[in-house]
Amino acid sequence: MVTRKPTPSSRQGRRHSAGPSASKRMTVVVSLLGLASLGLMARAFDLQVVGKQFYQRQGDARFLREMPIPVSRGTIFDRNGEPLAVSTPVMSIWANPSEVLENEDRIPQLAQALGTDAEELKERLEQRSDREFLFLRRQMAPEAAQAVLDLGIPGVNGQREFRRFYPSGEVTSHVLGFTNIDDHGQEGLELAYDDWLSGKPGEKRVIRDRMGHIVEDVEQVRAPQPGRNLTLSIDRRVQFLAYSELKAAIEKSNADSGSMVILDVKTGEVLAMVNLPTYNPNALVSTAASDRRNRSMTDVFEPGSTIKPVLMAAALSSGKFTPTSPLIDTTGGHWFFLGHDIHDTHNWGVLTPTGVITKSSNVGAAHIAADLDTSLMYDTYRAFGFGSSTNSGFPGEASGHLKPGGGWGLREKAILGYGYGLNVTVLQLANAYATIADGGVMHPPTFIKGGENDAKTIIEPQISKELIGMLETTTQPGGTAAPYAWIANYTVAGKTGTAHKATVGGYSKDNYGAAFAGFVPATNPRLVAAVVVDNPKKGSYYGGLVSGPVFAKVMDGALRLLDIPPDNIGRWYVGGPVQDQNGLTGSKPPEAPNIEEAPVDEATP
């Protein structure tokens, strides 16, 4: 067999038929790379230009968040700059439930750090697994919250907040009220001035990692506006003094409750307002709703004989009466008037109008009321603020009740003369006495230091002066408050009141309200106070014996705290002579009479 050798021309032909040349292959590769580059450029253009907003929103939705910037609630100060309510920084722990559930094995550890049950925590997370935010525990101490965060559990984060703290606790609770967990006022002045105190939280954009931790502050969307501070008319020292003495009196008499209000005569500013029972606003969980009631503002009572100075204001204004005339016959201590037995505790015989105040004669007061024009008496009661709000601005303030004068019968008018048939608040009573003390000028009560109010004249200054002189006799020998409301070195003007409490179908024979209202110094009044003790059950139940000493002890301390000089110079030094309206009369205050023999102003309506 013969084998042919391939010739050079045949080998070259095979090389040409084997495929495209290298230059062609290079062209193809370059073309493909060019097309790919164009595709990448087109895609980059689409991502960075055409679809930029969409993808930015998608990215922001995963990592960019708008977070609130918490602001501190304004501080509440007393009139001397002492803090009464402050906001302290705390930390709240929150979580993304789905992220925490992905690490279910760490839930017991988290529950232990939070002080809760692991099963309950897991159940809460599962119930809200469709959400991205769930508070696990609010307002923890920063140290305790940081210990939780240090566990490094995915999905668990912290948020700064503020919690309200009240340094004076239960002493100022009824005036201040309290805030809820979101730091908004719920009662008292915290509620009344919530907009002023709250401020406005800011807002910022932040970037968070997949664990929820903030890695970068992007920008501030809205600047925070901290709450504004508030300076009250309350004097914390006087407030504490009133609280202590009222508490002691209630415990001593085993009373159901009590209230005391102290006003600045010249301005109407509330210097102290206390109520018992009370509560601690720093520990609301364990308090009863009834204990949180500001009884001085929301509860009403029949004032009893403490209304008699207002009756006397009408009597003196009528021109029919002066402090010394006409003489009023109360002989026998009873007056059967239109089928109603009006009686006194003693047979006082013939009394002047001043004597009616001194002895607190219901018979005398009824005679005066019966002799007055109904419209004048009604208008005077209304002018002193009874039956209407004092416009103090305090939430829930009661207006009391005073029946329109057109509906008064003769018997009803006589009974109204000694304080039955109408309802008032402790603040209304204190404000009425402040009006007498300031020459007949009424200042609407205010809780704000330097607060503006529209003063108005209610009675003539001369009538006010005469009333003050009549009220001074109450605390002098023979008066219903002597010596219980007596204050060394100061003249005191005031009035006692002891009233049966209304019950279903009539009045209780065993339950009383014991009251005293007055002001000091009588010659230049600066402070006025009203004290009401509800249903004293141990010892005496008379206003002079129960509430009079509270007034005296609190006012004695307040006069010194406020540097108000004595007005009874005869008592300036220890053991010095005692001075009364008749001059220097001795070196000792009158001795306290036996309780059973003490003159009282109990009245049967």
Image (cartoon, grey):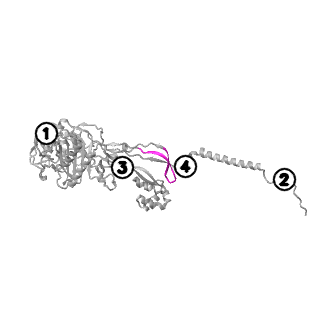
Where residue 503 is drawn, which disc sits there? none
SS class of the residue under badge 1? loop
Residue lying furthest front in this view? 574
Q: Is residue 171 magenta?
A: no
Question: Of callouts 1 and 3, which one flags the residue occurring earlier in the amino acid sequence?
Answer: 3
Any part of residue 409 in sight: no
Residue 292 placed where, x, y %?
Answer: 30, 51
Label 1 neighbour load within 10 Å: few <14, some 14-19, many 20+: many
Say what amino acid the circle numbered 4 marks: Gly
Question: Of callouts 1 and 4, which one flags the residue occurring earlier in the amino acid sequence?
Answer: 4
Highlighted magenta segment, given as a residue range: 200-219
Contact? badges 2 and 4 (CB < 8 Å): no
Query: Compared to 1, does 157 lie above or below?
Result: above
Any part of residue 438 in sight: yes
Q: State the residue position of label 1.
A: 323
Label 2 neighbour load within 10 Å: few <14, some 14-19, many 20+: few
Q: State the residue position of label 4.
A: 59
Contact? badges 3 and 4 (CB < 8 Å): no
Question: Of callouts 2 and 1, which one flags the residue occurring earlier in the amino acid sequence?
Answer: 2
Q: State the residue position of label 3.
A: 164
Q: State the residue position of label 2.
A: 12
Query: In this rendering, would 558 be left or right of 595?
Result: right
Contact? badges 2 and 1 (CB < 8 Å): no
Q: CA distance from mark 3 to mark 2?
A: 99 Å
